[in-house]
Amino acid sequence: MSTVLSTVVIVLASIVLLLCLRWTVAISGRLNYDEKLVDYSVSGLVGSRRFGVGVKKDQHSFSVYLGGRERKFFSFDLGGEKKTKKPEEPSKKAKPRKRRSINHFAMASSIRRSIRWRGLSLNGEFGFNSPARTGKMFGTLMAIGNGLTSHRFHFNIQPNFNRQMAKISGTTSIQLCPAVLAWRIGKVYFGFNR
C-alpha cells in the first residue's frame, strides 16, 4: 500500500512541478516561392531552449521528434499528405446550449500577461511582378522593422526588383508557465474578481 501511495505522490508532484516550470515554445518556418514552385517547412518545439518535444511539417512529411531544433535524439514519421475524408452525413439537430458570456478583452489581456515574447527574426528576399509594388512593400517593412525595439526583433529582408519570388525564413519564441496561464484564464472564464 505504501509503495502505491508513494508512486502516486511522486507522479502528482512531478506533474505539479512540470506545470510550475517555465516552458519555451519556439516556432520556425521557411517559405520558398519562385515562379510556379512553392516549398515550405514549419517546425515547433515545446520544452526548454535546448531540449523538448517538437513537430516538423513540410510539403512531403510530418514528423514528431524529441530533442532540440538542430539536434534530434529521437524522431518518428507520422505520414505524408493528408487523405481526404468522406463528408459526414448531417445528424439530428441538437438543442441549442446556453453559452457563457466571456469578456474577450479580459481573456486576451490575461493571456498577454502570462506569456513573454522572446523575439522575432525574419530573414530573406522577396519580389513582386512590379518593381513599384516591391519598393512600396519594402518601405513598409523597413518602417515596421525600424519602429520596433532592435534587441527583440530582427528584420533582414531584401527586395528583388527583377522577378516575382520569395525566400523567407523566420523564428520566434515565447515563454510561459502553464499553471499561471491556466489560473489567469480560469479567473476570467469563471468571472472571479481580483
Image: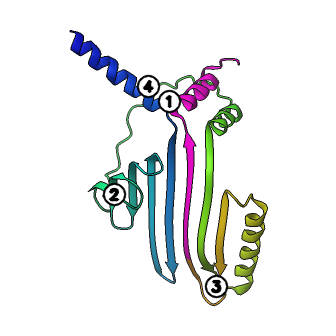
- Report the amino acid beneath label 3: Asn
Label disc, if present, on residue 72 of the rendered structure: 2
Please provide the residue range marked out in magenta.
167-194
Circle 3 sits in a helix, a strand or a loop, which is it?
A: loop
Q: Which residue is mark 4?
A: 16
- Residue drawn at the location 46% of the way across and 46% of the way down: 48
Q: Considering only order in the chain, which callout, 2 or 3, is on the residue closer to the N terminus?
A: 2
Q: Nearer the viewer, residue 53 or 184?
A: 53
Dot 3, crowdedness within 10 Å: few (<14), some or many (≥20)? some
Q: Earlier in the sequence, mark 1 or mark 2?
A: 1
User: Residue drawn 70% across and 17% down?
Assistant: 193
Of marks 3 and 2, the one in the foreground: 2
Across and down, in percent, residue 156 comes to: 64, 72
Q: Are marks 1 and 4 in contact (CB under 8 Å)?
A: yes
Give the number of the disc on residue 94: none
> What is the distance, in whole Å, between disc 2 and disc 4 at their CAs?
27 Å
Which quadrant holds residue 7? top left
Using the image as rendered, state which of residue 69 and residue 77 is in the foreground.
69
The amino acid type, in three-letter code, at marker 4 is Val
Residue 175 highlighted magenta (yes or no): yes
Q: CA distance from mark 3 to mark 2?
A: 35 Å
- 113 shown above or below 27: above
CA–CA distance between discs 4 and 3? 51 Å
Tag shown at residue 160: 3
Q: Which residue is rendered at x = 60% and y = 25% of the image?
A: 189
Q: State yes or no: discs 3 and 1 in contact (Cβ < 8 Å).
A: no
Report if residue 98 lies within the magenta region.
no
User: Would you name the residue on which mark 1 appears?
Assistant: 20
